[in-house]
Amino acid sequence: MSNQITRRSFIGAISASAATIALAACGSGASEGDTAAAADYTLVEEGKLIVASDLDFPPLDSFEGGEAKGFDVDLSKEIGERLGLEVEYLPPTNFDAIIPMIKQGGKADIGNSAFSITEERKAEIDFTDAYLDSNLGIAVKSDSDAKDEEALNDASKKIAVQSGTTGEAYAKENMSTATIVPLTTVTECMAGLSTGHYDAVCADLPVVGNMCTMSFTDCEVSVEVPTGEQYGIVVSKDNPGLTAAINEALADMEADGTMAELKEKWFGTTN
């Protein structure tokens, strides 16, 4: 999941100067939120960056004790701070409902839920620059006698996937003889695997790896699929100014080391 973002030159001092000029133009009493609201993009609610996520994809995002947590959550908060906006997360939203929500508008400004950038999705919405790389992983019970794709691609096998994900698309294409079972969350998939309802789970490698280590210790990642996916933040095609503003924030975070700090915090590596 290390990032291969196209890095654009972005100098923090210039950004700070531009922000100072903008504040001066708004008057000495203007707040950061006022400045952000006056920027070249629209927001569902003035002064806020409202985020949609399924919040069930640790360590990228999760919902613990009524609070959103994870790498993507910290990323959203950092972007909001740099844009002078308060970040607000909607209640957990089904993953496959987020892109239609952003496309329709009116409820959330962005979708940040480990979205792999695909041409199919880009036909519906815009993506920011990529901020993280990922591959897929196939998880099985540790004592299973069917651990590779060939053994799992059998009519007697059930493969659990999260609906609307690249894991689902991969399983349907590469293990089509098996029964592919779309579920709402990866947690449901892994719980079903652990209890014997399913023979495997196909999902993003960092997530299934984390769940096998932290929650479902009777399971293991048996196959790492080098799909070379990249994550991007979802923005409406009607809001290109917001995409541009977030891209500047992402580039700034790369340049000043913030992105590396977040990766170290959540993944134990800066790559």
Image (spheres, helix red, strand yellow):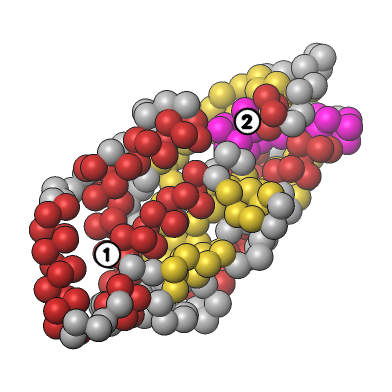
The residue under label 2 is: 210
Label 1 Cα neighbours within 10 Å, binned few <14 / some 14-19 / many ≥20: some
At x 47% / y 49%, what residue is drawn?
74
In the image, 217 versus 208, the foreground residue is: 217
Please tell me the numbered disc located at residue 244: 1
C-alpha gap between disc 2 and disc 1: 32 Å
Q: Secondary structure at mark 2?
A: helix
Q: Is residue 137 visible?
A: yes
At x 61% / y 22%, what residue is drawn?
223
Q: Magenta segment, which residues? A: 193-210
Q: Secondary structure at mark 1?
A: helix
Q: Is residue 88 above or below residue 186?
A: below
- The image quadrant that residue 154 belongs to is top right
At x 50% / y 35%, what residue is drawn?
266
Task: Name the residue type under label 2.
Answer: Asn
- The image quadrant that residue 175 belongs to is top right
In the image, 248 versus 239, the foreground residue is: 248
Label 2 Cα neighbours within 10 Å, binned few <14 / some 14-19 / many ≥20: some
Q: Is residue 169 visible?
A: no
